[in-house]
Image: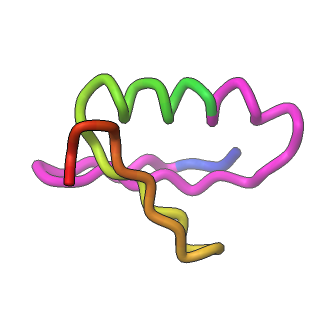
Amino acid sequence: MSMPLSVGIDHVIMHLSYSERSRPALEKIMELAALHGLVVYDPQFEEVFVPEGDT
């Protein structure tokens, strides 16, 4: 994974490289996003992950 982490009032941007070693970090990111009602966007695959209960 690489840095820096960009944090704003309405966003958090993380630049991650995927490998099996990064799987625990990605799982934690998704867990925290769901806990806090945050949307996760993956620009590489143009996928959006919305926490349950949000529309």
Position of residue 32 relative to residue 33, above or below, is above
- Judge from the rendering whether residue 31 lies leftward or rightward of residue 1; answer left or right: left
Judged from this view, the residue extending furthest toward the left is: 9
Q: Which residue occupies 88% across, 37% down?
A: 20
Of 51 and 28, which appears nearest the observer? Answer: 51
Quarter containing the C terminus: bottom left
Of 4 and 17, which appears nearest the observer? Answer: 17
Position of residue 7 relative to residue 37, above or below, is below
- Judge from the rendering whether residue 47 lies leftward or rightward of residue 54; answer left or right: right
Q: Which residue occupies 24% across, 53% down?
A: 11
Asked whether residue 24 is drawn in magenta, I would say yes
Quarter containing the N terminus: top right
Position of residue 20 relative to residue 46, above or below, is above
Q: Which residue occupies 21% across, 45% down?
A: 54
Judged from this view, the residue extending furthest toward the right is: 20
The picture quadrant where one finds residue 25 is: top right
Residue 4 position, x and y percent, is 49, 50
Residue 19 position, x and y percent, is 86, 45
**Residue range (magenta):** 4-26
Residue 15 position, x and y percent, is 57, 56
Of 2 and 20, which appears nearest the observer? Answer: 20
